[in-house]
Image (spheres, rainbow, N blue to C red):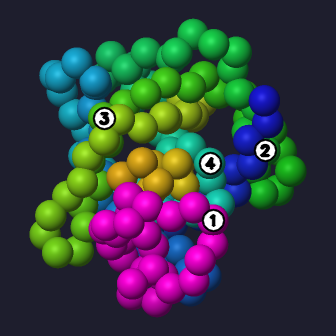
Amino acid sequence: MVVILPVALRRKKNTGMGTFYAKISVGNLHGGGTHETTALVDTGATDSAFPAALLERLHIQPNGGQPISYVTADGSRVICERGQAMLTVAIDDGNSVSGICPVAFWPDESWQCIGATTLQVLMLAVDAPNERLVKVETARRGWAGDIS
């Protein structure tokens, strides 16, 4: 399987290109330790991705299936294992939302992102002009216009 995954910007400041970061906690499905960090909100990425070493430290296991070939925006391919983690994303109103989401075991420490699948599972929408995530109460099927 090939999944398209844009190359992330590795800076943690606003790049002027509509990208922003959000606070996220990554944890094992069976409890135990969590890791809090910030990650790029990347609607062009299919899966959320975190360094494999971090996921392994949290005892998050790959699903054991065939590794996935992620194609980055520059056309390069990165082969990753895939698993599931408990992700908790902070939203601007002081609340957070949690759920079990697929995660890619990224092979190096250089990159982490919140992908589109996580946004869908947690029913979050991107408010790009205000660089924030907002909770939506209605699930969407395809593009249907305004999210309000």
List the residue tagged with mark 2.
71
Q: Which of the marked residues, 3 or 2, is nearer the chain's N terminus?
A: 2
Relative to 65, residue 8 above or below = below
Which amino acid, mark 3?
Met
The quadrant holding residue 21 is: bottom left
Disc 4 residue crowd, few under 14, some 14–19, many 20+, Cα 10 Å = many
- What secondary structure is found at the residue carrying circle 3? strand
Give the CA separation, mark 4 to mark 2: 10 Å
List the residue tagged with mark 3.
86
Is residue 33 left or right of 130 when viewed as pictured? left
In the rendered structure, are the residues bearing label 4 and label 3 in contact, judged by CB atoms less than 8 Å apart?
no
Disc 1 residue crowd, few under 14, some 14–19, many 20+, Cα 10 Å = few
- What secondary structure is found at the residue carrying circle 2? strand
Which of 12/113 is in front? 113
Instruction: Confirm whether the magenta stretch covers residue 79.
Output: no
Q: Position of residue 143 (x, y in %)?
A: 63, 72
- What secondary structure is found at the residue carrying circle 1? loop
Give the CA separation, mark 3 to mark 2: 25 Å
Which amino acid, mark 4?
Thr
Give the CA separation, mark 3 to mark 1: 26 Å
